Amino acid sequence: MPRRTPHDRRVLVGIVTVTVTVTVAVVSGCSSSPTVEAAPQAGSPACTAALAAAPALVLDQARTTISTAGALAWGDPAIVVRCGLEPLGPSTKSCIGVNGIDWVIDDASDPVTATSYGRAPAVEVRMPRAVGAVRLPAALVDLAPVATALPTTSRTCTGPT
């Protein structure tokens, strides 16, 4: 067996270091952690309790990493929940009731959003248009425990149904 010199060892260590660095950079670049702004009341006790009630899966997608306070995400592209928004007032936007929770829907943009109505603070669900246009009601069923954990301020929203 040939004997390795100190120079050979340094070259081998250098190759391993470069390989590990490149691998970490590639893996980090492949994951797309969603970026959203924290809501004004994201750190409130109500949001802490609500997010603790969040399910492990949404639309059969596992939770993904997100660094925003008061927010959780599932899947890729991500379904994002933000807690701590100001409660909504009456709206002309579409309103749907899912599992006893009213949601005001904004499907005019990407992502599609559903914001709880009659809860303080409010919680918002964001879904990419490609997913949200069809699967939003099913996601709201999965996420009902989050909104249910927030204090109720009103029973129904107004607007077209």
Image (cartoon, rainbow, N blue to C red):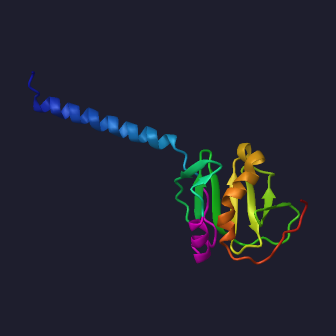
User: Residue 36 colored magenta?
Assistant: yes
- Residue bounds of the magenta highlight: 35-53
Give residue 96's quadrant in the image: bottom right
Q: Residue at x 77, y 67 (%)?
A: 100
User: Which residue reaches farthest top?
Assistant: 1
In the rendered image, the vertical position of residue 16 relative to residue 101, given as above or below: above
- Residue 115's spot in the image, x, y percent? 74, 63
The residue depicted at 62 percent of the width and 45 percent of the height is 77
Name, please, the residue furthest toward the front.
Answer: 99
Q: Is residue 85 above or below residue 24?
A: below
Q: Position of residue 91 (x, y in %)?
A: 86, 66
Q: Residue at x 52, y 44 (%)?
A: 31
Total number of numbered labels? 0
- Residue 160 percent location from the top left of the image: 91, 60
Task: Pick the quarter of the image with the N terminus.
Answer: top left
Say which quadrant the C terminus sits in.
bottom right
Q: Is residue 37 above or below residue 74?
A: below
Q: Nearer the viewer, residue 18 or 51?
A: 51
* Residue 48 appears in the figure: yes
Relative image position of residue 3 (x, y in whole percent)? 8, 25
Quarter of the view holding residue 101: bottom right
Q: Nearer the viewer, residue 78 or 145?
A: 145
Q: Residue 35, can we see it?
A: no
Q: Is residue 100 left or right of residue 75?
A: right
Task: Please check the rendered image and state whether residue 17 is part of the magenta-colored stretch, yes or no.
Answer: no
